Amino acid sequence: MNAQGTAPASDNPSVGIVVVSHSRALAKAALGLASEMLHGRPLRIELAAGLDATSFGTDAAQVKTAIEAMDGPAGVVVLMDLGSAVLSAELALDLLDDQTMRERVVLSAAPIVEGLVVAAVAASGGASKEEVAAEAQAALLGKRAHLDNSETAAEQPGPTDTDVTGTFTVGNAHGLHARPAARLVSEVNRLDATVTLTNLTTGAGPVPAASLSRVATLGAEQGHQLRVAAAGPQAKEAVDHVVALAARQFDETESDGPPRGPATQTRPATGPVGVSPGIAIGPLRRFAAPEVDVVDTEIGEPGDEWRRVVEAIARVRKDIEHVRALTVREVGEDEAAIFDAHLGLLSDAEILGAVKRGVQRGEGALGAWSAALTRVENELANLSDGYLRGRAADVRAVGDQVRQVLAGVATGLDLAEGLLVARDLTPAQAAALDAERVHGVVLMAGSATSHAAILIRSRDIPLVVCAGTALAEVPDGTTLVVDGAAAEVLIDPPAQVVEQYRTRAAALVDQRRRDLASAAEPAATLDGTPVTVAANIGSVDDARTAANCGADEAGLVRTEFLFLGRDTAPSVEDQERHYAEIADALGGRRVTLRTLDVGGDKPLSYVTMPTEDNPFLGVRGLRLALEQPDLLHAQLAAISRVARRTPVNVMFPMISTLRELREARAALDRACGSDGLPGQLRVGMMVEVPAAALKVETFLPHLDFVSIGTNDLTQYTMAAERGNPGVARLSDPLDPAVLQLIDHVCRAGRGRALVAVCGEVASDPDAIPLLVGLGVQELSVAPRMVPRVKAQVRDLDVGHCAVLAKRALTLASAADVRALLG
C-alpha cells in the first residue's frame, strides 16, 4: 500500500520506507501511529506484512516488490520486526536484479514501532536514508533514558546475559513431528527473543527453536523432557508461551496423527499395510520420480548462484501454496496443514544459511542446496522413533521440489487410467492425484503415517503401503488387484480370482450407486417419519456438490468464507451476489445462512478484537456481530434481499441469552426495512452452549427452528476443548450428558420449532439412530455424506430408535452408549 498519494518513487526525492512484519494488522497499526505524527505531510511507505490478511509470516518476493515500488534517488530504508523478517529482507535484496538499486537500500535493525514513528518523521522532513536509519536505530534512547532516570531504576535488576529457562514434557503421541514443530516455530518467530531447545532426556541440542529442521533433529518423543531457554527483550514471554503451548500439545488435533483403522493397527510394519479401504482393479501405471543429477555442470558467480536458489524457492513456494489451497477446498484444513511445515522448511534460517555459506564457498546452487537438505534428512533418518524418522520424507519432498526446479526437470503426475505404483509419493504428489483416473495406489515403501498416505486416504482412494520391491520388476500395464482393507496386492491373478474381486468391488460400487441414485428422493424411516438430510457448505462449489449428491437443502452455510482472508469487509452487493449464487447452485432449495461466526479463534484483520486467553469462551459469533452493528447490518440486509426471491433461513450463532436473540431479531427488522421480513425468510439459532439448550423454551417464541451444533455443544458440556488430544477421550458427542441436552431441545421444540443437528455427529452411523429416536427432524452433513445418510435413515424404525435412545440417556458414559449400539 502507498500510505499517501505521492509522485512515483523514481521521481520523488524523499526516502522510501518499507515495513517488513509478520503481522499485517501490527504493521497497519504502527503506520497509523506514525501517521499521527506527520500532521498531513506526505510519506512514501509500503507494507510487506503477513502472508495474507490473517496469516502470520513474511515473504521475500513481497518485500522485493515493496522495495522496487519505493525505490528512488534518495533510497529506501527497510524496517523489520523479528526472526524470519530479517531473512526475508536479505533474500529480497538478493532477488533485486539492479545492483545500483541494492546499494540504495538500508536494512535497519531498529524496533519496528518506535523506529517507524521516528523514521516517518525524519523521512517526511527530507532526511537522507542514512539519517532516517540512524534516527530509527536511536528510537529507544528516549524511553531508555526516562526509565533509567526514574526513582525506581536503582531498585530494578539490570540486564544480564543469563537466559530465561523453563522445562516441559512432550505430550504429543508422536512427539514433535512436522505439524506441532511447525506450530512451535511459527509461534517463536513472532517473539523478539532468541529461543533454544534441549532434549534433556537424550542430551540432544541445544538447537534454535526458530528452525523447523533443527527442532526435528531433537528426536523429541512423547514423554521426553525438554528445556526451553530464551534471551532478548521478550525472553520471559517466549519461555512462558512455549511452555503453555506444550501443555496444549501444540494444539495438535487427533487427526494430525496416523490414520486409524484395523489394518494399520494389526498388521506388522514389515509387511503390506492397508491404509485406505476399498477394492481397485486395473492396469499397473508406474510412476518414478525424475532423477536429478546434483552435480552442477556450470557454476556462476556466488551472487548469481544464490539468486538461482532464491528464485527456485520462490517458485516452489507458489506451487506448495497452490496445492495447499486445493487440498483445503477438496479435503480439509487438517490434511492441508502438512504444507505449512513444507513452507516453513523453505524459509528455515538454518537451512538457508547453510546453503548460502556453501554458495559463498564456490559451490553451485544445486550442490549447495542438496548438501544442506541431505544433511538434515540424514539427521532425521537416524532418529530412534519411527514416526519422527518418517519426517525425513518431508525434508526430502521439499528438497526434491527445489532440486527439480534448479535442474530444469519437468514434474507432474500425468498418468494413464489405472492403479498407480510408486516407491513413495510426496504430499504434493498425493494431493495432485486425479481420483477419476487413479483408482488405487500401491507404494513399495511409504508409511501408513506419512502425510501422503493421509491425503490419499482422505480422498477415498484404496491404498496399500510397504508393498515391497517385487513390484519394481512388474511390467507396466500388468493387471493388479488392490484391497485396501485387507492390505492385499495381487499381481496378474488368475481370471477367476479377478472375477471374485470384481464381484466384491461391484457390490460396494452398487451400494454407493444405489445410495446416490436415490439420494434426490426424500428420506423417510420404515414407519414413514420424514427426516430432512441437508448439507453443510462453505462455497458455491460445495453447493453444487450438495445438489449433485441429493441434499434436500443447505442446513448450514458458513458465511465467514466471504469475510476471512481480506483487508475489508465484503459489501452488501458482494454478499448478495454470493448468497444468490449458492441458492442458484442448489436449484432453489432452502438455504440456511449462518451469520458471521468469527472471533478470537478466527480473527478478522479489519475488525479490532481483544487478545483473549480462551477465545472459545470469548467474543465470538453473535457476541462479536452485536459489537459491530455495521458489519451485522450489511450481512442481514444482503440476506433479506436474497430471501425476497428464494427460500432462506437466517441462523444466529453462539447465543446464550434471550437478550442476544432479541437484539439480533431487532437488527434483522432494521435490515429488512419498511417492507418487513420476506415471506420466505425463517429465523433460527444455533444451540451450541449448554445454557441455550437448557432454557431453549425461552427462545422458541422468537424462532422458526433451532440447529444443534454438537461440536461446540460437546466441548462446552464436557469442558473438553475440541481438537485437544489430551482430552479427546472426553470429547464424544454420544456422552449421555450431551444426549440429554439434545433430548431436552427436541422435547421442547416438538410442535413448536424444527430441530436440526449440524455437527459432525449427524453423519456418524452409530449416532443417527439415536438422533432420530430423540426426535431430530433434520441432519445436516458434509455434501458427499448425504447419499449414505439418507440410505441409513430409510432402514430405521422410529419406534426401535426411540427405545434405543431412551436407554442411552440412562447410561454412564459414551463408551457405554457405543457398546449399546454395537
Image (spheres, helix red, strand yellow):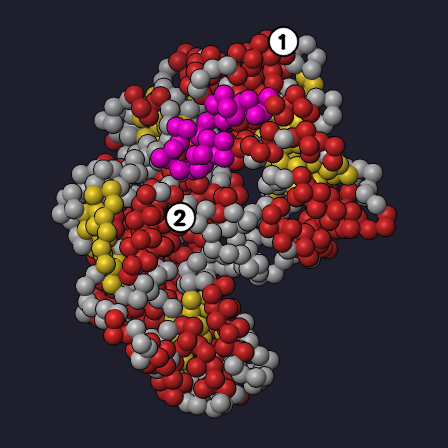
Q: Position of residue 371 (x, y in %)?
A: 21, 57
Seen as rendered, the residue at the extreme front is: 151
Residue drawn at point x = 23 percent, y = 58 percent: 164
Q: Is residue 742 left or right of residue 716?
A: right
Name the amino acid type tagged 1.
Gly
Asked whether 720 falls inside the magenta stretch, the response is yes
Q: Which residue is mark 2?
A: 339
Q: Which residue is mark 1?
A: 799
Q: Which mark is residue 659?
A: none
Callout 2 touching callout 1 (CB < 8 Å) = no
Seen as rendered, the residue at the extreme right is: 675
Q: Position of residue 338 (x, y in %)?
A: 38, 45
| Residue 734 visible, this orientation | no
- Check the picture and name the quadrant holding the N terminus: bottom right
Q: Is residue 381 left or right of residue 398?
A: left
The residue stretch that appears in magenta: 715-743
Above or below, 809 against 319 in this view is above
Crowd class of label 1 (few under 14; some 14 to 19; many from 20; radius 10 Å): few
Q: Position of residue 121 (x, y in %)?
A: 47, 84
